Structure formats: structure tokens, C-alpha cells
Amino acid sequence: MNAQLSPTRTATDAATRTIAVAHGDGIGPEIMDAVLHVLRHAAPNLQLQPVTMGEAAYRSGHMNGILPQTWDILAEHPVLLKSPMTTPQGGGYKSINVTLRKTLGLFANVRPCVAYHPYVDSLHPGMDVVIVRENEEDTYGGIEHRQTDEVTQCLKLITRPGSERVIRYAFEYALAHGRRKVTCMTKDNIMKLTDGLFHRVFDEIAAEYPQLEAEHRIIDIGAARMASRPRDYDVVVTPNLYGDILSDIAAEVAGSIGLAPSANIGLHGAMFEAVHGSAPDIAGKNIANPSGLLLAAVQMLLHIGEVDAARAIHNAWLRTLEDGQHTRDLFNERTSRRCLGTREFAHAVIERLGQTPQHLPTVDYRQAPPVALRQPQDAAPRKRQEKQLEGVDVFLDWDEAGRAPDALATRLQAALPDGLRLAVITNRGVKVWPEGHPDTFCTDHWRCRIKAVDGQLAPRQVPELLMRLVEHGLPAIKTENLYRFDGQPGYSVAQGE
């Protein structure tokens, strides 16, 4: 078996030997206790520093679920082993995972998806895929707005530095772990600027790794083939949202999302966790499977250089599966001999420390070179492109005249100052003026593209335009400036524009 669980350490100093530990909510405390019991036997020199986050922190009034002193501990001990957390229902509460990833700069989410057939039922025996997901950007910025009675929006942010960093990490990971291919998945046939940037950066960086095969897939067919032909893939790198969905698909196809570990890697710290949630319905019953968190702890041990302990735990866990010592979620008449509780499963793994599997491939973590975690600035500096303002998209909340686009166009044209022209009106991204289709459904949210007649708009003309629109009873709810970069449009060109 390849060393597919290792994100590879980023630091080997003494501070990384002390691990921050968050026990979590729901089943979190009991699976964490089970995992720590195994760690005490396999890595007795490891120091553990408890931190408080989750429901207890939410109840004390911290809307992000993290106590202030926890940040101080994480600054001193930047490797965190975390159990699942429960985010309270209702507005205002922030996801702990999103907060930790963005605040600590944990830009790469590494999720290995491995089949353990026949001991864990799998649709695809032999599956061994690693999903490397960008972890900080995309729609997970959480920047959303309600703009009209009928329309809300979510802002999707893809940056060149963020894309460079995670894509380079995926290639370096593939090299360090003897992988053969890196696949990029986006939807750039539709989102040509955002996903297009991610794909373009992938192609640029792939050229630096001629020893690795590189390919691109549109995410919809890519996800379908992950479910039907996962052996086509090796390492997959994606923007945030696609990676979140794809990694859950891959984990479930491999056997069970309950077994999937997750590493969140940054330049200065890391967080390790199970993929599954806090499952409060089975909390306290000693029936939860701690395997996802235990395999995340293996990732953590490799990250801090505890290779022998990682190898011992992983092989002992595989041998436990082979011996039919299963928790309730995996128990079946064909391969199971005993149905174990959470604590008893941990004891079974401990009993097998030093043993290796007889049928599943033995794990042999070789001392791989560290995965490069270079800042994006390390890339060759780029000349900034010439930027020219040529127009503005004005968004309106307009619900008059039966929502007739021609009526809106007439009012807009009457309001425009000299030197500006109305180029196009769209509704939900569909052109409705000029020459729109009568059957197009329209909401109360309109994008009105206004351009300079001579092709160049002075910045002062934008506020002047907005004041004219207010005077004509058409106040804007949002604007987006339209720029060209080195002569190329930096915006999506509307049909018929």
C-alpha cells in the first residue's frame, strides 16, 4: 500500500511534539478517548494539550465556537487533532472548521479514499485515490447578500496565489508519495474566469512536473467517473466546493465515509480530523467507530515525523479489520467475528501493535522528502497587467411595468449621461434586452451593462452615473466595474453584447 495517508510534515522542531487536542461534541469525546488510548501505547513521548472549542465555547458566547485562550495555545502548538464539532442551529454561529482553516491558513485539505475490501464492503476494491481540495477560497468565503425580494447571491472567489499554492502542493504530494498522475477538476466550460483561472494555473504548474501525468476533467463527468471508474484517478486537485463534494463521494465509493480521515495543511500549522460529523444520536452509547479519527492521527504522526508510530498503528488497524474485530457499522456475517464497542475496538488495535496484515497490503511508510510548502510569492514575479476601465454593471431591484425589459431599457437610456450607452440587460444571466426572448422568466433582479461610448470610462463617471439613476428612480443595489487587462476583458461577456 502506498503511503497515501501522509500529507508529510512541515516542521520537525520540538514544539510539534506537543499536540493540541479538541475532544469535540456528540461522539467526539468517546472516539477521541479511544484514539488517545492507542496513541499512548504507540507514541508514548507525545505530549497532549487539551483545548476548548465546540458547544462549550458557543454556550459561553463565542459565536465562532473557539475560546480566545485556544488561539494562544494553537499559536504555541500549531498541530491540532480534532474530534467532530456541533454547530448550533440558527443564525450568527460560524463553522469551526471554516474558521480554523481560514484563520490558520490551512490551505490544503488532503483526503485519502482507500478501499479495504473484503473486510469493508466497497463498490470498487483496490480503490486508492487522494483528493487535495483548496481549503480557504471559492464560495466558502461565506460572502452572501440578499439583494431583492426574490434574489440572493453568493460570491465565488478564486485567486491566483491560492490556486498556485494548493496545485503545487498536489504535485509535490504526488512526487513524495510515488503517485503517477494529478487530475484537476473544474467547471470552466461555464465559469470561464474563476474556474478558468484555476485550470490555467494547473496547466502552468503541470509543465514544471514532466515526470507526472497531468489531466483536466470537467467536474460533473469527473465526479461521475469517480463513482464508476475511480481507478482512473490517483491524486485529484480541485477548488473548495467541488473538493468537498467529490471527497465525500470518493470516501463512500471506497467503502464508508465513517473511515475517512482528513488533513488540513498550512505553512505554519495543521489540523487532523475525521470526515464524519458528531452523530449526537449515538453519542455516549460506546458504539461509534473511531477509525476515521484514528487514521487522521496516523496522518498527524507522519506530519510530525513519527513514522514508526504511524506505521505501527496503521498496520495494527488493518490487522484488526482482517481479524474480524469490527464496530457495529462494519459488522457483517461474512467477515466479522466480534462486534466491538468504541473502547473495545481501541483495545483490539493496541493488542495488534507490532503485527502486520496478512491479506491487505502492509503499510510501509518510507522516509519521503517533505512536501514543498512554498509561498506563492516564490514563483517568478509577474508583470502587472495594464488595467483599463471601460464600463460598469449596475444591478437594479426593479419590479414595474410587468417586468418588461424594453420598459426598463427606455428608463435607463433616458437617465444615462452623455458619453455612456446601455449595452445589454440580463436577468439571472440571460440576455433579455436587446432582442430578448418573450418566454424568458424574469425576477426582480436586473444586470444592466453600461459602457463608455469611446471605450474608456473615467472613474469619476461611475458615481455620477449612480446619482443620475437615483434621480430617475433607479437606485443601484450593487455595481461591478468592467476592466480590460492588457486589452482582454476581465469580465464575462454577455450574449449579444
Image: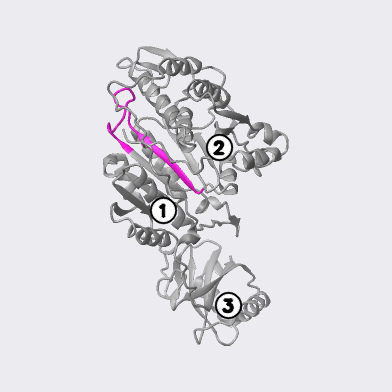
Classify residue 446 as left or right of residue 210.
Answer: right
Numbered badge on residue 167: 1
Q: Nearer the viewer, mark 3 or mark 2?
A: 2
Closer to us: 429 or 28: 28
Residue at image position (58%, 29%) is 47
Image quadrant holding the N terminus, namely top left
Render colour scheme: one colour
Closer to us: 444 or 112: 112
Label 2 element class: helix
Whole-angstrom CA distance, mark 1 to mark 3, is 48 Å
Q: Position of residue 254 (x, y in %)?
A: 34, 33
Numbered badge on residue 263: none
Q: Nearer the viewer, mark 2 or mark 1?
A: 2
Q: Position of residue 477 (x, y in %)?
A: 62, 66
Q: Quadrant of residue 399?
A: bottom right
Which amino acid type corresponds to the residue marked 2 in the rendered image? Answer: Thr
Label 1 element class: helix
Which amino acid type corresponds to the residue marked 3 in the rendered image? Answer: Arg
Whole-angstrom CA distance, mark 3 to mark 2, is 64 Å
Does label 2 or label 1 sit earlier along the sequence?
2
| First to last magenta residue range | 107-128
Residue holding disc 3: 411
Q: Quadrant of residue 379?
A: bottom left
